[in-house]
Image (cartoon, rainbow, N blue to C red):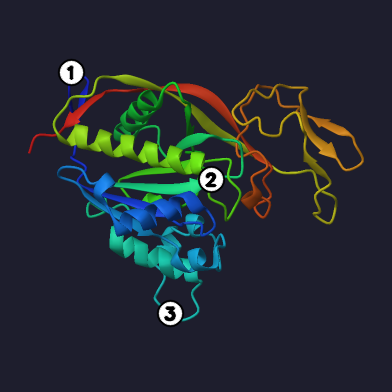
Amino acid sequence: MSSRTNISCLQEAKRVAIFGGTHGNEMSGITLVNMWIQNSAEIERNGLVIKPFISNSKAVEKCSRYIDTDLNRAFTRENLSAPDVEGLPYEVQRAKEINRMFGPKGSSYAYDVIFDLHNTTSNMGSTLILESSKDLFNLQMVHYIKKAMAPLTCSVLLNEHPQLKYSTTRSVAKHPIGLEVGPQPQGVLRSNVFESMRTILKHALDFIELFNSGVELPPCTVDVFRVQERMDYPRDTNGNITAMVHPHLQDCDWEPLNRGDPMFLTFDGRTIFYEGANTVHPTFINEAAYYEKQQAFMTTCREILAANAIRKACK
C-alpha cells in the first residue's frame, strides 16, 4: 500500500468468494449460495471472479451447526498445518481443504474477499463483522453498504480483541467480512432475513466493482461496536445455569446497558443487575448457539473509526 496526500492506493480485488453453510443450520446463507451456484447472474460483476461456496457441506446435509467441531473456529495455524492423517475432525479436514482452495491464509495467493454468511437467533438485525480496524478496504466497503441501506440500520461489529478473536472461516481471505442477520431460528428460513442478506451482498459487490473501476472513494468514518467481553450465565457449582436473560435485556441488542440495569433473572425470581463501571452495548443476546460456549451475550463499546480515501493502485 502506498499513499499520496492521504489517499491510500490498494490492490484491485479480483477474486471474491461467498460462503454459506459455515454453520449447517443457518439457512439464509445456505439458500442464497445454493441459488447462486445454480444461477450466478445476479452476483456477476465486471472483471470479478465470484465463487459461491458451501463451506460445511456435511453439516448442511444434517442441518446441524457442525459435525465434530465449529468450523468457524477451526482456521488456526495448528489445524491448517496439521498432517493429513486419518482421524482428524471433519471440520479440521474441511478447514485444510478450504485453505488450499481459497488461500493459503496470509499469502499473496489468497482470495481477495470472502463474505461469510451467518444467521443469529439474537435480535441483532443486519450486522457486518470486521476483524481489523486497519483494513481500509473493508472500512470503506461497510461505509458504502451502510449508506446504501439507509434508512435501514446495518450495525458493524469489530472483533480484534486479542483473547476473544477467533480463527474464522473467512480469515483465509485478504479482506474477510462476516455477515450476521437475524433474528432467525436455527433450521428456519425467514423471507425478511433472507432478503436483507441478499440486499447487503448486492451492495457489497457493487462497491467492489466501483472500486475496481478506478473510482476514488473519499475519506469516511464508520460507527462500530468494538468487542469487549463475553458474559456467561450465572451458574451453580456444578456448572448448571441458574438464571435467564432478564426480560428487560432480551431482544435489546445494541441498546445501552448501564450500571444497575437488570441483566439476569434467576429461576426463583431474583433480578441480577449489571455492575460494570461503564455503559456497554450488548449483542448476541441469548444466542442459541452460544449456550455451549458459555456465553449469554457479548459486551461492546461504541466508537468511530476513520478511514483514508482509497483508490485502485496503478499497475
Q: Which residue is mark 1?
A: 5
- Residue 291, given in percent of the width and then of the height, sits at 68, 51
* Residue nearest the observer in this picture, 237 or 95: 95
Disc with the residue nearer the chain's start (2 vs 1)? 1
Q: Nearer the viewer, mark 3 or mark 2?
A: 2
Q: Residue at x 20, y 33 (%)?
A: 211
Is disc 3 surrounded by few (<14), some (14 to 19) or many (20+) residues within 10 Å? few
Q: Secondary structure at mark 2?
A: loop
Q: Report the amino acid beneath label 2.
A: Arg
Q: Secondary structure at mark 1?
A: loop
Q: Which residue is mark 3?
A: 85
Q: Residue at x 65, y 22 (%)?
A: 279
Which label number is shown at residue 239? none
Residue 1 visible, this angle: no
Which label number is shown at residue 190? 2
Number of marks = 3
Disc with the residue nearer the chain's start (3 vs 2)? 3
Residue contact at pointers 2 and 1, CB within 8 angstroms: no
- Residue 151, given in percent of the width and then of the height, sits at 44, 21
Q: Residue at x 53, y 45 (%)?
A: 190
Is disc 2 surrounded by few (<14), some (14 to 19) or many (20+) residues within 10 Å? few
